[in-house]
Image: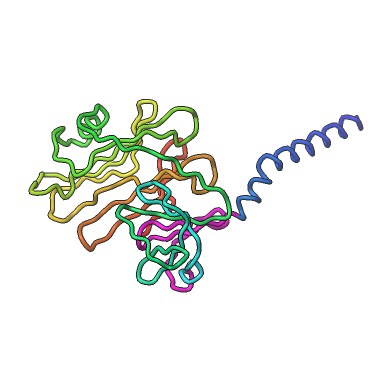
Amino acid sequence: MKKIYVFLIVLVLGFGIVMFLLYGVDSIKREKYETALVVGDNTTWIYQKNKWMRVEDNEKYAELNWQKYHVFEGNKNIGSYNLWHDDIWYIFDDDKNAIMTNDVWYAYKSNYDIEVTDFIKEDLTNDEYVNAVLSEKGLPLENDYTTAYKTSVDIDRDGMEENFYVISNVFSMGKHPNRIFSFVFMVKNEQIYYLYDDVRDYKAYAGCVPNIITFIDADDDKVDELIVSCDQYSNLGRIDMLYNFDGEEFKILISNQ
């Protein structure tokens, strides 16, 4: 009987050690992860102790000023530059020459490796899944789109690419549809998963035009997160959102609102 107790104790201890090596060590390592993620002129998020937080006070901005960031424009790495925040973020090289951008940009600095996934946008004309979404929402299949494209990325690293769609008829020039809409959704195994879903009656200057900014493994969990921005009318600004997919649905980890 004593031998059985010893065996069980050793078995439990061995299981505990294995579980600690598998999960505990990784958890301790991840507790030390820190990153600053900047999206465009004003959105700034901090990742510390497995949590995302918005940067909103000048004291925190001062801590982030004149640091080296990996800067991306149109999802292409344009180099490592210094960022400085006053009323908005500005980009400078080492000689303090201003770096100008013509496309949507984002930047990060971190104490761990972050992987960014390249992707290509493909213009849409007619697509069965777009038609399925429009039909489900009671919308006409023929529309004057402000934006309509898809891209394919293997966000969960299972060897199969998922298709991501972005469509909107908001702010279409000279058009006044009865209803305006904006959708961002993923198709995986022929199932539709919504990220952004907005349908409303037409009203001038209402609504928001979405755009996928990047696919980025921002927390090193081997699953890509998405940064999706949504442009509102004129000086109403832009809504920036960081999404993750838990296998069943998309959730917003943090936004700038």
Q: Residue at x 30, y 46 (%)?
A: 211
Query: Farthest residue in the right direction?
Result: 2
Q: Is residue 68 magenta?
A: no
> Does residue 94 appear in this view?
yes
Question: Can you say which quadrant of the picture contains the N terminus?
Answer: top right
The part of the chain drawn in magenta is: 33-60
Q: Nearer the viewer, residue 180 or 58?
A: 58
Residue 145 in the image: state x and y as whole percent.
17, 41
Residue 16 in the image: state x and y as whole percent.
74, 40
Q: Nearer the viewer, residue 193 or 94?
A: 94
Find residue 89 and report its image quarter. Answer: bottom left
Q: Is residue 113 above or below residue 164?
A: below
74 to the left or right of 114: left
Find residue 164 and report its image quarter. Answer: top left
Q: Is residue 47 magenta?
A: yes
> Does residue 257 appear in this view?
no
Q: Nearer the viewer, residue 158 or 68?
A: 68
Q: Is residue 147 above or below residue 154?
A: below
Q: Residue at x 24, y 30 (%)?
A: 132
Query: Farthest residue in the bottom direction?
Result: 59
Find residue 254 and report its image quarter. Answer: bottom left
Q: Give the number of callouts.
A: 0
Q: Residue at x 71, y 43 (%)?
A: 20
Q: Is residue 79 above or below residue 177?
A: below
Q: Residue at x 39, y 32 (%)?
A: 162
